[in-house]
Image (cartoon, grey):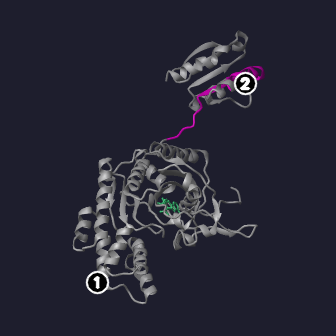
Amino acid sequence: MSTFQTLPGFREFYPDALARRNHIFRLWRQTAHAFGFSEYDAPVLEPLALYKAKSGDEIEAQLFSFTDKGGREVALRPEMTPTVCRLVAGKAASLKRPIKWFSIGEFYRYERMQKGRGRCFFQFNADIFDEPGIEAETELIALLAQCLCAFGLTEADFLIRLSDRNLWFHYLEALGLDEARARAILAAIDKYEKAGDGAFNPYAERFGAPLDPAIKEKVLAFLQIKTLGALEAALAGLDNARLAARLADWRALLGNLGAMGLRDYVGVDLGVVRGLAYYTGFVFEAFDRKGALRALAGGGRYDDLAGKLGCAGMPAAGFAIGDMTFALLLEQRGLMPALVQAPDICAVIGGPRERLAAFGDIHALRAAGFRVEYPMKDAAFGRQFKAAAESGARLALIYGGDELARGVVKIRDLAARTEQDVPRAGVLACVREFFSAR
Ligand code: HAM
């Protein structure tokens, strides 16, 4: 074992692990393309200021940050959202609407390590810009659901919990709380599921007194809401136009998702408020139904962030799926395929002269897109046949002295155990025919 270990929470991908990761990325990419999203990319190292006061205290405390040789304060990106806002802000006027973008990249957070949480992880990010209405949320939640369903997961495996910071703000305002108090309460709600009543301690410290028990009771009842009916009932007594308009948005969004056949994938859950500071409206998180894993994905509307990055009046919404919890869920459900990396063809080579003859065909076959392997060193025929059979290849191409003398190659179908001699000039055509027939 090397004395140089990876840093805690950092991952290495051996080929079998990378094959699994690539499989996940391939299906996410394919799904995003089907939904009309365009792929972009951006640097992993960013100015520290991009995250300060943009992402929120929790992420700020988790930054991998340092001063570079030019004296700049920099950070490894903990998330994509501020970066993608900067990208859009940089070309906002010339970008074709709707702006529907996605990316797959690596992110870094100095977090306490636990199952499904590391210090470097990949995220699939999808965001829509300049669409203020629930049409954006409809598209994003449908994409999120399909990014999970593409692997064979169903509504029995995961649930997208939908909530609304906007509604929360209007509700807390209707209870007589100012914005600072409302934000502190939302921070407590974000922690409530894990920390219980202790989640309200920072509120008491900040404002010098605990939250009024009558208000707290209302807040705790509101965060238990799990259906549209219960939400309608809770708001029925409050004659508040903004709350009523919000309720209309809820009905429309759930109606849209229902029409897509996705209603069973989405649950109303006002207990979700999201820890990131920039969310302004609908927020959502995807969890496995058994509740055994950390969040699979999270996102929501953030209408003000692009404004802070130089592009005022640019509403936005988006989400990110993390690769770690997701891979755990696929494995738990037996949905991670065995990704064998078998060659199409193995060449079996008699000796140095035959090797030179084989090289021409091997190169031509590879150039035509076939995966071809051959032994790097001369070896007995028996050993080469055994290796070819074990490799999982479909065909063996045999270059013996006898074949060479007759100007042919022996092509063996390794599964059917049949073989035929093919003139050297016809090898590529014969291989092509074999694979196209299957
Ligand atoms: P987030 O909830 O911080 O949101 O992260 C989204 C997902 O990334 C999580 O649900 C989780 O699967 C994964 N993730 C986060 N931290 C870790 C970690 N330390 N180890 C492993 N996986 C992790 C955001 O990042 C937002 N920027 C999403 C977004 C995009 N909002 C709008 N657009």
Tag 2: residue type?
Phe
The spot of residue 403 in percent (x, y) is 69, 13
339 is within the stretch colored magenta: yes
Q: Furthest-front residue in view?
A: 93
- Occupied quadrant, residue 190: bottom left
Q: Which residue is mark 2?
A: 359
- Observer able to see residue 269: yes
Q: Furthest-right residue in view?
A: 352
Compared across the picture, whether 244 is left or right of 377 comes to left
Nearer to me, 301 or 129: 129
Compared with residue 339, is residue 232 higher up or lower down, i.e. above or below? below
Compared across the picture, whether 387 is left or right of 198 comes to right
The spot of residue 184 in percent (x, y) is 43, 78
- Which region shows up in magenta? 338-362
The spot of residue 62 in percent (x, y) is 57, 70
Compared with residue 398, is residue 126 higher up or lower down, i.e. above or below? below
Query: SS of the residue at dot 1?
Result: helix
The span from disc 2 to disc 1 (Cα, nearest Å) is 82 Å
Tag 1: residue type?
Ala
